[in-house]
Amino acid sequence: MTILLITLGLYGTALGRALLSAILSGRRNLSIVAACCIGLGGQVSLAGVDDAVVMVEGCSGVCVDPAGFVLTARHCDLPTTATVRFKDRTVTATRVYVCREMEGPVVYDCEGDGYPFLPIAATAPRVGERVWSCGYPHLNGRRELRWANGPTLRWSTFEYAGGSFNGNVVGFVTAPGWSGGPLLNAKAEVCGLLNSSDCSTSVFISSAAVREAYAAVRHSRSADPPPATGKPKLYVFGSMTCGPCRKFKEDYANNATFRQTLDAAFAVEFVDVDKQADTAHRFGVTEVPTFLVVGGVRVTGYEGPDQLLVALGVRQEIAARPPPQRDVVPDSVAPAPPPSEGKADPPATVETPASNTPVVEAPAASTPAAPQAATAPAIADRLDRLSGLVQTAVSIATWLGVGGMTGGAGGLILGGFALWRTLRRRRDPKPARDPPAKVAPPPVVTVDSPPPPQAIVPETRFAPYERDTFAEAFAWAETELVRKYPGAVSTLETLKGLINQFLSAKGVKPTK
């Protein structure tokens, strides 16, 4: 009753409204009521905390900046783009920071700004100091906000998935789904994030890791003002061990047209992922080369200047061009083929365009080896013509009445020439006319169009930066099980023996 009266008297304050709401809602866990009562005399104020505590997919988290920076735990293994549920709205957030340790904070940037938030504590909680935590665990098939509080027991170094991280051990228990929920001091300042819990205690990521994550995000945001030129910034994430990355730098440095086109559209900034791992984690870059315009396009891989400009939307895709026409070289200037060494030159062949005019082959020139073969027919032809003239003369003389010795002599001569012509024709018959010259068919000239130019696409390979394996998960589970249940050591040894036996049967070398 005393608490109720005090609450009614303070109803005009945020603390009084939060306390009255907790009493009237009938929550089973009244830790918030106790916290508010302590606040009446101990300057503790946890009012409005539940406005900044959120659900990030299957885990919990807390908003630490009005710009919408939400912190959660890395072991939740959330995607690059996640859904964040505040008490009064649901938004989409992009991962902008991942810690280097195997376990630590992850920061998401929510769309827009003006979000309820809790400040980051400047110092870590002291041993024995009372701290609070709240989150959204999975209970009875639903998720509801739950509170817990207790003393800070100690700080220590913990092993997780083959790596180590610093954390604080507190004296209260949490539940699955609470991971990433904030650890709060008496001023409602965030001094840790929930990592794990057992039957009596819970482990929170250290306050120093939380401060480092928030400082890195704020520094990158302040160091990345909008360009004064009004052009969007193009981040080029690459590495010196990446072939396509080096190829892009060479093209950007040596191809003036490519560089001017890119600089006219963007403010280009190179990021070496080996030296600026925080920036790569902040933008969720896991492959190189990656070309990123914040709030715009993201291109992975590099095949050449034209392909990149098209992918970035700077240039439209060039339509396929018709194949170039082959120039026709006139016959008069056609180059002659070089003579083959040790062989006679082949007859020259001249390509002519297809036409309907027949091409007549010229007779082959006579060779020096056949002069006699050409002389014999010429003498025979002369004798034939001579005999014809004699026969004509005799006929004329007979018609004119010339007789006697002249007619007899002419008859003998004519008979001799006729007999000689008959015998010669039987021995070497000769056609009356020369055969017609052979007419060669018109040549068919085919001009093949050259094939279109082929694009050479270099092979691009990318290397992932983060990858958790089943072996790491098993090693972590083994460590946690031994820590929580020391009596399970013999059971784990038996399980490892069975696993090694199975691997040996498969021909795989068992692990030590």
Image (cartoon, rainbow, N blue to C red):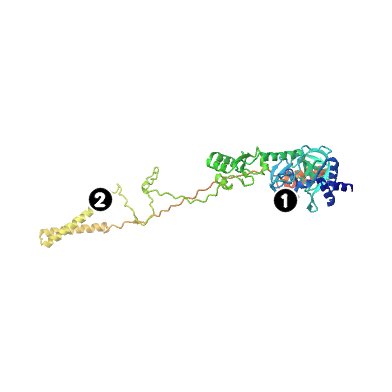
The location of residue 167, given as percent across then percent down, is 78, 39
Q: Position of residue 129 (x, y in %)?
A: 83, 39
Toward the viewer: 285 or 83?
Answer: 83
Which element carries disc 1, helix, strand or loop? strand
Q: Position of residue 138 (x, y in %)?
A: 79, 51
Q: Quadrant of the C terminus?
A: top right
Quadrant of the rendered image containing residue 302: top right
Q: Secondary structure at mark 2?
A: helix
Labelled disc at residue 375: 2
Report whether 287 appears left or right of 17. Answer: left
Amino acid type for the residue under numbered disc 2: Thr
Task: Please tell me which residue lies in front, 366 or 41.
Answer: 41
Q: Alpha carbon of mark 2 to alpha carbon of mark 1: how far?
A: 114 Å
Q: Which residue is mark 1?
A: 90
Residue 418 to residue 254: above or below: below
Image point (20%, 59%), residue name: 418
